């Protein structure tokens, strides 16, 4: 309870009395400062600190003072806030300033508000100092009092004190930065008038005008600068009318800002409902009326040994949604209040009135009372049907509670547990102990008619309050699912319940018996449910022994409507606890396969029938637009056993490729699928073939990877550069080919097909050609599926093998090309590389493939074009231009051992030489062997014969005398061919001039008319020859020789030939010439 105030002197009631009062106060203050100079400096610092503490609340503090003034006279007060460009005016009705109020301005912490009879909002008398953030010259007009403050007046007062006290003067001198306290030295009467500048005088005039308008007190705050004016305008704009709810002493406030419509706010009790209020907001021509439920409560709490009074208030907006705000202690604090609505309590505030006092027992007790009051208010409003919707929504937290308000939150929930604030699904209001809840979101999926005792919630936030704040117990999941299973649910109710159970309960409680099958019967507990296929004919295609079931189409439609997810796959995934599996060939097959596996492991009496039925139903269900089902699917093969479909091949009953496979794998029945009938498949060959290919059966010989055969290791190794790098992406090693050994530092695998050796050894030649022609993988230009070699190497036994990323020969194609399996025209089989499709003039060099009959081609689905394609893919060349470099050298090695005319072999050399593109380096090991062992045809004295390549040379034969030619081993190639190409392609060098010389030994000259005529004609022709050659080429070297050459006509000429160490004498052939120095000898018969 409030204590009676002590006796005090009557307040001044005239300007003269106030002047005397101020003079007495100033005299006491001056004496105190003279006696204790440190007081002056301390008061200056304290005033500055208090001013800073209240920054941001300047306008609010003035309005708070206005509310206290109205409380003292026990009449509703009016407040005016007027912001001009250079000054703020706050006017109010109510009790004018008392002497104690003026004293508290002059000396902090001396306010008499705590001992006044009326309840005051402010209790320390400090808030007025907030305006010093904006001004140095405030003015006050209240009752008979009119006073002001200014730095100039305060400085004059302090200077006068300093003249009287050297000690004070010394302290002030040392504290040069300290400004004198402003409010300690008020100016009144003539002192006030003498300190006014013209602007301030005009403000005082406006203050007096406001007093004349009926306001009891006016405070003017001349702005120190433009920033202060902006802050004043901002605070006025941020001012909320909600404070009228908690400050009953103010019923009206008027706010006037520069160049803005005037705002008038007023509050009045509702004429319709006791306890409600309306706030009228007029903003220029706009009017708004707010309706609020306002509940107040007063009481006291025991703190220590004393009773402490408190006042509480809660306001809930009823005409529109009410959001969360901040805690009020009459005016807004800085503490966010997460509950919706506005809350007020009389609390102990910090000096800046923004925050609560720390470690305040009173605050903790009052806030707990506020929480209890809130819960009880909600119950009262619920019972009176004053709030629509769920009362729990008001207990939802819209953010985290500050630490200082957690006692309020706990008190609210603690009291709410005890009150019937929870409406059940059957419409009954229950307490938290009397209620139950279901899984998360249960209100959205449990039918009310079967779960009446559960709390009815309208939002997830309210449900969170039930779970985490009111701690309502949850119904047992087993009881929930059992009740749903036994209930007579509609399809819609069942769908909602299934979706809810799937999204909230553990998998243990996802009872498949809640689902209905296509016949609207509950599914067995072990069923594998599938959505109904879009094709009605598929809905009855599952075997009887399967546990798979199709969900009722009506139920499935409802499930899709309510299940979570935006796509079909996401919706099905949300029902995974019920084992609902997406209807696809893969999922259905998986369910069928699981059941089939169970029956087979159980020793079923007819395993072949089960597996055949499985394939038959799979054929009926499959959709080739979808992916092949995962896992192993077995088919019955020619060997009478079931094998993985991906490891076997189509057989003769399944189209052309099957017929070819049957020929290729005649010795391997385990690799060929048996007839359709024994596999449970229809007889439609084309559709069954497409089905089996969809399952993954091999249309052509199955590709596989094996270790590189030993006989091909050197071939692959020689294809490597002498130095190369292997790398696993992280680390690399540089290897030298000649230093590597297989298995120790080199290993390789290669791509081949199943039983390739048996195919090439035993299959009909035309069947192999048909496979090669029709299998797209055999196209050497197909990069999608190469038959490659994978090689790995390492430097030593301690290192890891790492892959080589370079180009390597395709061993698979080399095996096909080099193996003897191709039937040729002579009735024998040869390697494709030894045959040519169009040998032409070289027919005796190459084997010609056997031409198939029309019936044979038709048997394998071929025509002549496809047959030729098969030959080409096998490695049979069309003509010499297609012959690879290694084949050329290999053929050169084979020719001497074959019974082939030498002129044909010479013709072969000429055609090789005439090829536009030929790279000897691609000859590989075959070229190296040719370099060592190769032989070529030459023309000897007795005709053509073979000679070792290394002993032969090439020369222009027509330029050599016959006697010379008979002594040289000249390769049988025509004259005037590119000697460089001969050397590059056949490794046969051109004849070097330094190893042979020809000299005329004797000449028997010819005289007479014929010799003279020939010599004359030569001299006459020389100028023309020179002119023509000069036109063709500017090179003068040959022309000089032509100018100096002479012609000798001889009957006989003997020449000396030196080849190495051998010397030969012989006659020059008739009508041949020999160039000797500067003479041309023409031998005539």
Image (cartoon, grey):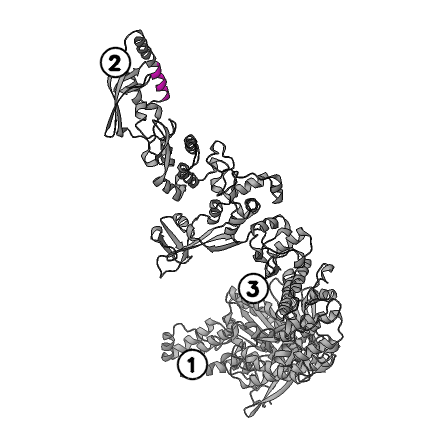
> Whole-percent x and y of residue 969?
32, 30
Which residues are drawn in magenta?
Answer: 1024-1032
Compare residues 90 and 189 and report the one nearer the observer.
90
Residue with the mark numbered 1? 39
**How far is the residue under mark 3 from the one under mark 2?**
140 Å
In the image, is residue 939 above or below residue 65? above
Among all residues in the image, which is located at the extreme bottom? 305
Compare residues 938 and 1020 and report the one nearer the observer.
938
Q: Quadrant of residue 340?
A: bottom right
**Labels 3 and 2: the sequence-earlier one:** 3
Question: Dot 1: what SS?
Answer: helix
**Labels 1 and 2: the sequence-earlier one:** 1
Compare residues 52 and 715 and report the one nearer the observer.
715
Query: What secondary structure do most residues of the magenta stretch adopt?
Result: helix
Judge depth for marks 1 and 2 and give the one in front: 2
User: Would you say the residues marked 3 and 1 are in contact, meaning their CB atoms lie under 8 Å apart?
Assistant: no
Q: Is residue 357 magenta?
A: no
In the image, is residue 781 above or below residue 22? above
**How far is the residue under mark 1 from the one under mark 2?**
153 Å
> Whole-percent x and y of residue 1053?
27, 17
Judge depth for marks 3 and 2 and give the one in front: 2
Say the numbered circle drawn on residue 1004. 2
Q: Residue at x 67, y 51 (%)?
A: 685
Say the numbered circle drawn on residue 85. 3
Q: Residues within 10 Å of mark 1 (few under 14, many from 20)?
A: some
Q: Residues within 10 Å of mark 2 (few under 14, many from 20)?
A: few
């Amino acid at each position: 309870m409030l204590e009676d105030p002590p006796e005090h002197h009557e307040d001044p009631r005239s300007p003269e009395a106030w002047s005397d009062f101020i003079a007495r106060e100033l005299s006491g203050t001056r004496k105190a400062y003279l006696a204790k100079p440190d007081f002056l400096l301390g008061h200056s610092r304290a005033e500055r600190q208090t001013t800073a503490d209240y920054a941001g609340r300047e306008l609010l503090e003035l309005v708070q003072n206005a509310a206290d003034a109205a409380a003292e006279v026990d009449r509703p007060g009016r407040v005016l806030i007027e912001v001009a460009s250079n000054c703020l005016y706050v006017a109010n009705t109510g009790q004018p300033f008392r002497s104690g109020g003026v004293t508290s301005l002059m000396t902090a912490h001396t306010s008499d508000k705590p001992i006044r009879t009326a309840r005051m909002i402010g209790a320390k008398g400090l808030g007025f100092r907030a305006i010093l953030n904006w001004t140095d010259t405030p003015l006050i007009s209240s009752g008979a009092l009119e006073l002001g403050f200014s730095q100039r007046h305060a400085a004059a007062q302090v200077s006068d004190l300093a003249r009287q006290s050297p000690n004070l003067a010394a302290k002030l001198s040392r504290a040069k930065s300290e400004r004198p306290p402003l409010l300690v030295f008020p100016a009144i009467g003539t002192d006030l008038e003498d300190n006014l500048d013209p602007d301030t005088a005009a403000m005082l005039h406006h203050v007096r005008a406001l007093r004349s308008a009926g306001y009891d007190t006016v405070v003017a705050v001349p702005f120190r600068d433009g920033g202060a004016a902006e802050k004043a305008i901002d605070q006025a704009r941020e001012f909320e009318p909600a404070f009228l709810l908690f400050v009953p002493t103010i019923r009206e406030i008027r706010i006037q800002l520069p160049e803005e419509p005037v705002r008038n706010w007023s509050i009045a009790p509702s004429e319709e409902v006791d306890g409600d209020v309306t706030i009228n907001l007029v903003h220029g021509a706009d009017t708004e009326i707010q309706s609020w439920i306002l509940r107040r409560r007063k009481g006291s709490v025991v703190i220590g040994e004393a009773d402490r009074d408190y006042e509480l208030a809660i306001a809930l907006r009823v005409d529109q949604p009410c959001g969360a705000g901040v805690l009020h202690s009459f005016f807004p604090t800085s503490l966010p209040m997460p509950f919706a609505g506005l809350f007020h309590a009389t609390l102990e505030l910090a000096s800046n009135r923004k925050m609560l006092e720390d470690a305040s027992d009173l605050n903790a007790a009052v806030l707990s009372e506020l929480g209890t009051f809130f819960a009880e208010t909600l119950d009262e409003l619920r019972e009176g049907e004053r709030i629509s919707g769920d009362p729990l929504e008001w207990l939802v937290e819209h953010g985290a509670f500050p630490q200082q308000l957690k006692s309020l939150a706990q008190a609210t929930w603690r009291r709410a547990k005890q009150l019937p604030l929870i409406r059940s699904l059957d419409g009954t209001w229950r307490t938290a102990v009397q209620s139950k809840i279901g899984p998360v979101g249960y209100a959205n999926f449990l039918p009310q008619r079967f779960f009446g005792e559960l709390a009815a919630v309208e939002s997830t936030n309210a449900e969170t309050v039930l779970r985490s704040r009111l701690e309502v117990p949850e119904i047992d999941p087993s009881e929930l699912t059992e009740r749903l299973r036994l209930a007579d649910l509609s399809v819609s109710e069942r769908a909602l319940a299934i979706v809810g159970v799937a999204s909230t309960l553990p998998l243990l409680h996802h009872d498949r018996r809640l689902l209905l099958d296509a016949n609207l019967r509950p599914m067995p507990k072990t069923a594998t449910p599938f959505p109904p296929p879009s094709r009605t004919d598929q809905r009855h295609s599952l075997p009887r022994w399967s546990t798979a079931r199709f969900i009722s189409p009506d139920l499935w439609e409802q499930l899709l409507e309510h299940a979570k997810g935006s796509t079909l796959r996401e919706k099905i995934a949300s029902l995974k606890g019920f084992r609902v599996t997406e209807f696809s060939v893969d999922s259905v097959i998986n369910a069928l396969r699981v059941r089939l596996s169970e029956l087979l492991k159980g020793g079923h009496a007819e395993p072949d029938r089960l597996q055949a039925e499985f394939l038959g139903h799979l054929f009926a269900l499959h959709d080739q637009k979808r992916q092949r089902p995962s896992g192993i699917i077995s088919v019955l093969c020619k060997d009478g056993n079931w094998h993985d479909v991906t490891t076997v091949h189509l057989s003769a009953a399944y189209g052309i490729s099957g017929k070819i496979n049957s020929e290729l794998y005649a010795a391997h029945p385990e690799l060929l699928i048996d007839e359709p009938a024994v596999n449970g498949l229809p007889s439609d060959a084309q559709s069954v073939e497409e089905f089996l290919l969809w399952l993954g059966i091999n249309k052509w010989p199955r590709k596989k990877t094996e270790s590189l055969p030993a006989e091909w290791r050197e071939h692959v190794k020689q294809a490597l550069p002498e130095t190369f790098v292997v790398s696993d992406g992280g680390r690399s090693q540089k290897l030298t080919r000649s230093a590597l050994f297989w298995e120790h530092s080199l290993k390789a695998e290669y791509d081949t097909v199943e039983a390739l050796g048996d195919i090439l050894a035993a299959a009909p030649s035309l069947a192999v050609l048909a496979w090669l022609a029709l299998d797209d993988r055999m196209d050497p230009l197909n990069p999608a599926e190469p038959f490659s070699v994978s090689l790995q190497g390492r430097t030593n036994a301690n290192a890891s093998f790492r892959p080589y990323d370079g180009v390597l020969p395709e061993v698979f194609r080399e095996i096909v090309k080099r193996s003897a399996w191709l039937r040729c025209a002579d009735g024998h089989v040869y390697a494709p590389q030894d045959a040519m499709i169009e040998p032409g003039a070289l027919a005796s060099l190459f084997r010609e493939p056997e031409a198939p009959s029309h019936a044979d081609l038709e048997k394998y689905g071929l025509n002549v074009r496809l047959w030729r394609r098969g030959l080409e893919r096998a490695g049979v060349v069309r003509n010499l231009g297609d012959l690879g470099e290694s084949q050329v050298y290999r053929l050169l090695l084979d020719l001497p051992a074959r019974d082939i005319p030498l002129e044909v072999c010479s013709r072969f050399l000429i055609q090789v030489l005439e090829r536009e593109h030929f790279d000897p380096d691609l000859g590989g090991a075959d070229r190296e062997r040719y370099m060592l062992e190769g032989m070529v045809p030459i023309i000897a004295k007795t005709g053509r014969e073979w000679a070792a390549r290394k002993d032969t040379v090439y020369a222009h034969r027509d330029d050599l005398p016959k006697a010379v030619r008979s002594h040289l081993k000249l390769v049988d190639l025509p004259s005037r061919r590119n000697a460089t190409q001969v050397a590059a392609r056949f490794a046969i060098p051109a004849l070097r001039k330094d190893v042979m010389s020809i000299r005329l030994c004797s000449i028997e000259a010819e005289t007479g008319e014929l010799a003279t005529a020939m010599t004359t004609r030569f001299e006459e022709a020389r100028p023309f020859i020179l002119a023509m050659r000069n036109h063709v080429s500017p090179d003068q070297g040959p022309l000089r020789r032509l100018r100096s050459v002479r012609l000798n006509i001889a009957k006989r000429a003997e020449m000396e030939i030196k080849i190495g160490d051998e010397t030969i004498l012989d006659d020059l052939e008739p009508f041949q010439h020999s160039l000797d120095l500067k003479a041309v000898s023409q031998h005539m018969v």
